[in-house]
């Protein structure tokens, strides 16, 4: 699958609210996921197990009220998306709107790396 096809499928499923299907069909088992520069605790995870734990942490800590995703910008084996989210941090009850840029690397027809860039709260 070409990078543009992968990007389009990811956007489609995100817009439908299906955040599990991309992991099953588009991601490499050796995926690397990085939050900002990756230095914070849990800021870098590898493999499906790491992604699963990261997702569980997110669900335990955030209630998502609304989310949107941009159309992809593709350059060779890379693409980027902008995500807008309206969430409530469950432990504090604080609601906020955030924006982040996600950059993805594709190799051999699978996403092998994702990195998210956003302002820290």
Image (cartoon, helix red, strand yellow):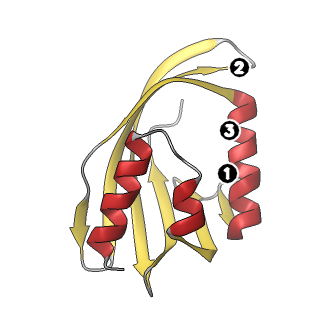
Alpha-carbon neighbours of circle 1 within 10 Å: few (<14), some, or many (≥20)? few
Side of 87 relative to 6 (left or right)? right
Q: Where residue 71 appears, x then y in whole percent? A: 24, 50
Q: Is residue 19 above or below residue 95?
A: below
Label 1–label 2 contact, CB within 8 A: no
Q: Is residue 29 visible?
A: yes
Alpha-carbon neighbours of circle 2 within 10 Å: few (<14), some, or many (≥20)? few
Side of 120 relative to 13 (left or right)? right
Q: Is residue 89 above or below residue 106?
A: above
**Residue for badge 2:** 90
Label 1 vs label 2: CA separation? 20 Å
Q: Is residue 41 visible?
A: no
Q: Where residue 24 appears, x then y in whole percent? A: 60, 64
Label 2 vs label 3: CA separation? 10 Å
Side of 33 relative to 8 (left or right)? right
Q: Earlier in the sequence, mark 1 or mark 3?
A: 1
Alpha-carbon neighbours of circle 3 within 10 Å: few (<14), some, or many (≥20)? few
Q: Quadrant of residue 15?
A: top left
The numbered mark at residue 58 is 3
Label 1 vs label 3: CA separation? 15 Å
Residue in front for this viewpoint, 30 or 22: 22
Residue drawn at (55%, 14%) of the image: 95
The numbered mark at residue 40 is 1
For label 3, the SS is helix
Q: Where residue 73 appears, x then y in whole percent? A: 22, 60
For label 1, the SS is loop
């Amino acid at each position: 699958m070409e990078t543009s096809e992968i990007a389009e499928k990811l956007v489609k499923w995100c817009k439908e609210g299906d955040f599990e299907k991309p992991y099953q069909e588009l991601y490499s088992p050796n995926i690397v996921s990085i939050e900002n520069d990756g230095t914070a605790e849990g800021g870098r995870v590898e493999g499906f197990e790491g992604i699963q734990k990261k997702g569980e942490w997110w669900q335990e800590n955030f209630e998502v009220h609304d989310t949107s995703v941009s159309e992809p910008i593709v350059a060779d084996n890379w693409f980027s998306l902008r995500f807008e989210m309206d969430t409530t941090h469950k432990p504090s009850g604080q609601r906020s709107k955030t924006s982040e840029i996600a950059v993805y690397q594709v190799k051999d027809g699978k996403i092998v790396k994702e990195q998210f860039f956003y302002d820290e709260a």
